């Protein structure tokens, strides 16, 4: 049995319900056959984001919609994601091959608004930021970022366990995000992967903001 945490059930009006059903159906058609695990992960992120939204006073509709769609471009191979990003003019200032795992959120946020004009800009921002983060994350951005890292299908390794525990304790959202973001940075360093300089900038900005708050 995976991690279990619930904050109650969200209530949606008819329009929102119809929209969420359509998004889930579209994701199923787009992803389930080719990437069944990624499909299950996406729905799990959507549920976790919805629950966190309820806990932290964010729109559960926007959180769930962003969760459903956040990995839309993960149906593409690594090389296809790079080519897709280049075609869309995504430029992170370094060779796209080096930051391939970061590209799918940015590309999805560029292309999906045309398909779903009914969704607000806040949803696209949360999707865009779910891989890299930002120094000025909105509450919705943080909810989606964290939900992606702690959804119940993910194994309960110590770094994830710590963040889940903070959520269970009702820790401030900025602290939960910091724990999730900084453990991601640690993981990149521990596993000797390429650390995107933009991530380091965000890390330093968050550290300085935390110093000022003390
Ligand atoms: Fe994800």
Image: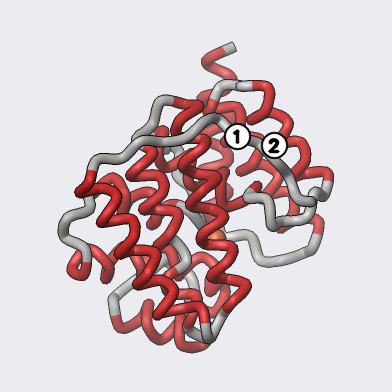
Please tell me which residue is depicted at 71% across the width and 66% down the height of the picture: 193
Queried on whether the Cβ of the residue with tag 1 lies below 8 angstroms from ligand 1, the answer reads no
Nearest to the observer: residue 21 or residue 39: 21
**Residue at the extreme top of the image, as rendered:** 214
> Which secondary structure lies at badge 1?
loop
Q: Residue at x 45, y 54 (%)?
A: 67
How dense is the environment of label 2, judged by Cα within 10 Å: few (below 14), some, or many (20 and up)?
Answer: many
| Quadrant in the picture for the C terminus | top right
Give percent across and percent down for residue 183.
71, 44
Give the percent coordinates (x, y) of residue 107.
Answer: 36, 70
Residue 171, given in percent of the width and then of the height, sits at 62, 22
Residue identified by numbered label 2: 163
Q: Mark 2 or 1, which is nearer the eye? A: 1
In the image, farthest residue toward the front: 14
Looking at the image, residue 90 lies above or below residue 205? below
Tell me where residue 6 sits by quadrant. Answer: top right
The answer to whether residue 136 of the structure is visible from this angle is no
The image's mark for residue 81 is: none
The CA distance from mark 2 to mark 1 is 15 Å
In the displayed structure, 67 sits above or below 89; it is above
Q: Residue at x 57, y 74 (%)?
A: 98
Nearest the viewer among 109 and 188 is 109
Which of the 4 quarters of the picture holds residue 108? bottom left
- At numbered mark 2, what does the secondary structure look like: helix, strand or loop? helix
Colour pattern:
secondary structure
Ligand 1 found in image quarter: bottom right
Q: Which residue is labeled 1 in the image?
A: 6
């Amino acid at each position: 049995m995976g991690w279990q945490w619930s904050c109650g059930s969200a209530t949606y009006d008819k329009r929102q319900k119809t929209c969420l059903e359509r998004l889930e159906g579209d994701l199923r058609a787009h992803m389930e056959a080719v990437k069944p695990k990624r499909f299950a992960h996406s729905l799990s992120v959507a549920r976790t984001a919805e629950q966190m939204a309820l806990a932290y006073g964010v729109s559960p509709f926007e959180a769930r919609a962003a969760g459903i769609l956040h990995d839309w471009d993960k149906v593409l191979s690594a090389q296809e994601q790079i080519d897709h990003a280049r075609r869309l003019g995504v430029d992170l200032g370094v060779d796209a091959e080096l930051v391939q795992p970061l590209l799918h959120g940015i590309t999805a946020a560029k292309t999906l608004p045309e398909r779903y004009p009914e969704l607000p800009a806040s949803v696209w921002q949360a999707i865009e930021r779910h891989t890299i983060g930002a120094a000025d994350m909105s509450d919705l951005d943080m909810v989606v970022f964290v939900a992606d890292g702690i959804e119940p299908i993910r194994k309960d390794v110590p770094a994830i366990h710590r963040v889940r525990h903070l959520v269970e304790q009702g820790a401030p959202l900025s602290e939960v995000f910091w724990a999730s973001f900084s453990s991601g940075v640690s993981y990149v360093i521990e596993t000797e992967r390429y650390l995107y300089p933009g991530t380091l900038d965000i890390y330093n900005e968050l550290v300085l903001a935390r110093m000022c708050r003390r």
